[in-house]
Amino acid sequence: MEYNELFARTELLLGKEAMQSLAGKKVILFGVGGVGSWCAEGLIRSGIMHLTMVDSDRVAVANINRQLPATTQTIGELKVEVLKKRVQEINPHATIHAIPEIYSEESSASFHLEQYDYVIDAIDSLGHKAHLLTTAAQSNAIVFSSMGAALKINPQQIKVAEFWKVRGCKLASALRERIRKGSGLHKPILCVYSEERLSNKGEEALPDANENGSFHKAQTNGTMVQVTAVFGFTLSGLVIQDIVKNA
């Protein structure tokens, strides 16, 4: 099956020139958990041909309720490797790079953000996230970011706004405070967010909610796939819309 066969229904809507543009763009995605994994799926099923995925975590039982690579058969496997296999089955012509590493200030230069057209942030760590956004904003890439998707159940409340205009999100507020103290952002960054904020009701489930991730979370919060997946698909949609607009 050729590229044009796999994405005939997409080309029918977008046209040949847009498909050629989609196939030529390079995207790097940081974080392939509850948000990022669905973003990867949305990108590949839309015709993106060059995707790099960065995440050091392995699939945990507590990921199964919302993360695309997580099943009872993939527990213990690297998320990026599970996803790479999946998306290459969707489009075997795509060039997929799976990097099982953590983005940090120390490792940032190794990712060569200048090589990409789009940088997508779907990581949880406040410090790493702030550094990624400020660093990516200095590159020529277009940057999209996910704010907090936990403690929400209503996908109809999900919105998109420029970073400095996001309201009602504690993660966005903490990021703005940290970034104001640093170098700031050198370009607009569209963010996916929701003002909905519920409270955990099932504290007795905490012992089973540990994901053994690559960094310690100050608090473990409940999450739902109906929200995290829409966050991820919205991020992928922002990329596709931008490419089509400029094709």
Image (cartoon, rainbow, N blue to C red):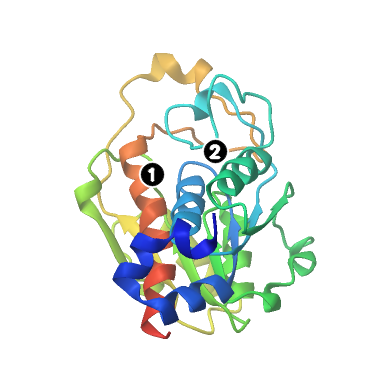
Please give left or right for residue 163 compared with residue 208 in the image: left
User: Could you tell me if residue 160 is visible in this image?
Assistant: yes
Q: Nearer the viewer, residue 189 or 94?
A: 94
Q: Quadrant of the C terminus?
A: bottom left
Q: Position of residue 204 (x, y in %)?
A: 41, 13
| Tag of residue 205 | none
Q: Position of residue 73 (x, y in %)?
A: 59, 20
Please give left or right for residue 228 compared with residue 179 in the image: left
Q: Which amino acid type is marked by label 2?
A: Ala
| Tag of residue 228 | 1
Q: Residue furthest left?
A: 156
Residue at 78% across, 69% down: 109
Say if 198 sits above or below 202 in the image.
below
Q: Position of residue 61 (x, y in %)?
A: 55, 22
Q: Residue furthest top?
A: 204
Say if 55 sits above or below 62 in the image.
below
Say if 185 sits above or below 36 in the image.
below
Q: CA distance from mark 1 to mark 2?
A: 20 Å
Q: Residues within 10 Å of mark 1 (few under 14, many from 20)?
A: many
Q: Which mark is first along the chain, 2 or 1?
A: 2
Q: Nearer the viewer, residue 198 or 52?
A: 52
Residue at 29% across, 40% down: 152
Residue at 32% across, 68% down: 12
Residue for badge 2? 218
Please give left or right for residue 69 compared with residue 112 in the image: left
Q: Quadrant of the N terminus?
A: bottom right
Q: Which amino acid type is marked by label 1?
A: Thr
Q: Residues within 10 Å of mark 2 (few under 14, many from 20)?
A: few
User: Could you tell me if residue 165 is visible in this image?
Assistant: no
SS at mark 1 in the image: helix
SS at mark 2 in the image: loop
Q: Position of residue 114 (x, y in %)?
A: 69, 78
